[in-house]
Image (tube, helix red, strand yellow):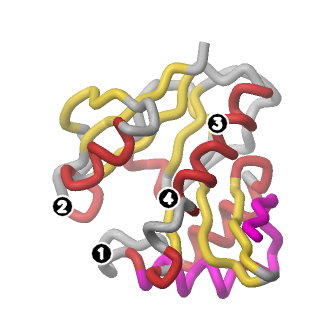
Amino acid sequence: MLNIRNVKKLDLSDIFIIEQLCFPQEEAATKESFEMRIQVIPDSFFVAEENGVVIGFVNGPVIETPFITDDLFKEIKPNPETGGHQSILGIAVTPHFQTRGVAASLLTHVEENARAKSRETITLTCKEDLIGFYENHGYRNMGVSKSQHAGVIWYNMVKKLQ
């Protein structure tokens, strides 16, 4: 059975392996980035477990603006108690568990958490091939992002919560 919980320091190596499996090296977050996110924003960093094994995760800080900016990949601040925009800097599921609803469950968990804390929106960027996936989960495509992350074209996807 799938269990979603807040991240722990012990999850770092599993998270880093999943990230490496799911993203090209130039797009993948570094181990240092994950260490910082685990330390600074454990309240918006969730892992999905199957039989006690980490099979996926979602994370991102609460930000003041409705769109993600590239500086967030390097530096983040603790989340405010309420308000703001819940960003998703990363969501990844071990390839063996993809297409089984794990990412959808993680998105639902983030949304429930964000609603409970009166966040205005959930915001993320994705590549063109994932726009449909996020639209099916209630996100709107707000066009091409200004992000230069990894030299890829990213799209701003936003889900209003209020």
Mark 2, Cα crowd under 10 Å, few <14 / some 14-19 / many 20+, is: few
Amino acid type of the residue that numbered disc 1 sits on in the rendered structure: Glu
Q: Residue at 38% across / 38% down in the picture? A: 136
Q: Residue 90, which numbered label?
A: 4
Asked whether residue 45 is drawn in magenta, I would say no
Residue 150's place in the image compared with 86, above or below, is below
Q: Are the two marked residues, 3 and 4, in contact with CB atoms closer than 8 angstroms? A: no
Mark earlier in primary sequence (4, 2) = 4
Report the side of 46 relative to 124 (left or right): right
What distance separates the C-alpha of mark 4 from that of mark 1?
Answer: 14 Å
The residue that label 1 is drawn on is: 26
Mark earlier in primary sequence (2, 3) = 3
Q: Nearer the viewer, residue 151 or 102?
A: 102
Mark earlier in primary sequence (4, 1) = 1
Q: Nearer the viewer, mark 3 or mark 4?
A: 3
Q: Residue at 71% across / 48% down in the picture? A: 44
Residue range in magenta is 1-21
